[in-house]
Amino acid sequence: MGRTLTTLGFDADDTLWQNERFFRLTQDRFAELLLDHCPAGLDRGGLDARLLEAEKRNIGQYGYGVKGFTLSMIETAIEVTDSRVPASVIQELIVAGQMMLSYPIELLPHARRAVEALADSHRLVLITKGDLLDQERKLAQSGLGDLFDAVEIVSEKTPAVYHEIFTRCGDGAARGLMVGNSMRSDVVPMVEAGGWGIYVPHGQVWELEHAEAPVTAPRFREIHDLGALPALVEGIG
């Protein structure tokens, strides 16, 4: 009898390598630049909330990633200052966004070992959201690119998207597994598509990626880090 699992999907950002912390550092810089220009009564919490509102509005137009985040920072800066934000601040925000596109890739613990351990026995697919060029850059710099049989950069991760990818790249979602740090994007929709959703938490999670864990779903698992993934896959069969 063949394996139950034939195709394994991996999220990229904050699953294989560091990412969210760079957004947090840039958001700190955004607040540092803007607070002196904000109206009285708008504190750091209020400024963060306004930025998050802009990000929510803009996802449909700009998608996920650094470019959309940078444009949302600029839009928020203009809005909260009633268009009085100095051009020098806008320039600083652009520079901050550009810096995010040049940070070196730092693999998370056990990422390389887990991917290498599974590459010979399963088809591996990298499934990620974000800007195409930036994600391609990060994958190339990670040194993991040759281990994946396919790379899918998508605008959203939904049950339909997982069904299509795992059908095209594998033997359907029912014989697939998706591992990632986002309950909303990596785990819940994969479980809803009929596959295995494996949650591997990592530090802070962007507010828009929160979701309730499908704790009663028989194909949901949580692991402490990627070091536990090969044994979990072997146990599923």
Image (tube, rainbow, N blue to C red):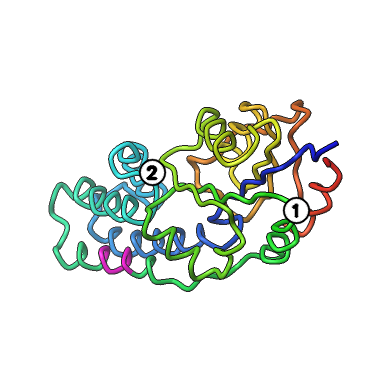
Q: Position of residue 139 (x, y in %)?
A: 50, 63
The vertical placement of 172 against 96, above or below, is above
Judge left or right: residue 74 versus residue 121.
left
Q: Position of residue 222 (x, y in %)?
A: 75, 43
Judging by the rendered image, the residue that carries numbered circle 2 is: 52
Q: Which residues are magenta?
A: 93-98
Q: Is 205 in the magenta?
A: no
Judging by the rendered image, the residue that carries numbered circle 1 is: 121
Of residue 24 and residue 219, the one placed in the foreground of this image is: 219
Judge left or right: residue 67 versus residue 121.
left
Q: Amino acid at mark 1?
A: Ser
Q: Residue at x 67, y 63 (%)?
A: 111
Q: Amino acid at mark 2?
A: Leu
Q: Residue at x 46, y 63 (%)?
A: 22
Q: Position of residue 124 (x, y in %)?
A: 63, 51
Judge left or right: residue 106 versus residue 64.
right
